[in-house]
């Protein structure tokens, strides 16, 4: 049986980022990918998340190509940064520019 856990997000993610990525940018997949990565980051207490395209695709229900496109968009928006690592699970840093 799966356990449920509560993950707290900044209000900015739902109040501003959701309508911005989904409504304005028309990239709901980018919002889903950010939400999954931010959730993992919150649960682990680290901004650096190790996750392959396949892992993110499974967690979001998106295709790997949709995840790639979403990650490109998130990088352009300054919300995710990929760390140069040589492994099967690339490390992605979740950025929160609104918290500067």
Image (cartoon, rainbow, N blue to C red):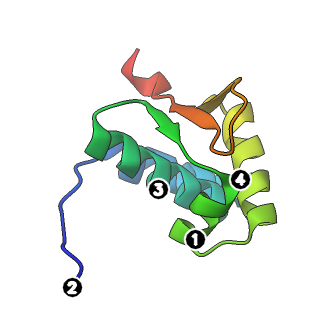
Q: What residue lies at 48% left-to-right and 48% top-to-bottom?
A: 37
Q: Is residue 9 above or below residue 53?
A: above
Q: Name the residue tied to disc 1.
A: 58
- Residue, disc 4: 70
The local secondary structure at tag 1 comes to helix
Estimate the spatial distance between the alpha carbons at disc 3 and disc 1, rounded to whole Å.
11 Å
Point 58% across, 60% down: residue: 55
Q: Position of residue 53 (x, y in %)?
A: 68, 55
Q: Residue beneath label 2, please?
A: 1
The circle drawn on residue 36 is: 3
Q: Residues within 10 Å of mark 3 (few under 14, many from 20)?
A: some
Locate residue 56 relative to residue 88 in the image: left or right. Answer: left
Q: Secondary structure at mark 4?
A: helix
Looking at the image, do the residues carrying marks 2 and 4 touch, with CB atoms under 8 Å apart? Answer: no
What distance separates the C-alpha of mark 1 from that of mark 4?
Answer: 14 Å
Question: Based on the displayed image, in which of its 4 quarters is residue 76 positioned?
Answer: top right
Residue lying at the far bottom of the rendered structure: 1
Residue 88 seen in the figure: yes
Location of residue 81 by image quarter? top right
* Rendered location of residue 89, percent (x, y): 62, 44
Few, some or many residues within 10 Å of mark 4 (<14, 14–19, 20+)? many
Secondary structure found at label 2: loop
Which of the two labelled residues, at mark 3 and mark 1, occupies the earlier sequence position?
3
Between disc 2 and disc 3, the foreground one is 2
Earlier in the chain: of badge 2 and badge 3, it is: 2
Image quadrant occupied by the N terminus: bottom left
Mark 2 vs mark 3, CA separation in Å: 21 Å
Q: Element at badge 3?
A: helix
Earlier residue among tags 1 and 2: 2
Select label 1 or label 2 by which is in front. Answer: 2
């Amino acid at each position: 049986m799966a356990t449920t856990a509560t993950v707290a997000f900044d209000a900015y993610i739902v109040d501003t980022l959701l309508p911005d990525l989904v409504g304005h940018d028309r990239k709901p997949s980018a919002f889903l990918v950010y939400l999954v990565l931010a959730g993992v980051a919150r649960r682990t207490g680290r901004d650096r998340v190790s996750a392959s395209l396949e892992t993110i695709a499974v967690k979001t229900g998106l295709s790997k190509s949709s995840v790639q496109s979403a990650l490109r968009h998130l990088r352009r928006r300054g919300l995710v940064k990929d760390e140069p690592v040589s492994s099967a699970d690339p490390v992605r840093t979740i950025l929160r520019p609104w918290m500067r």
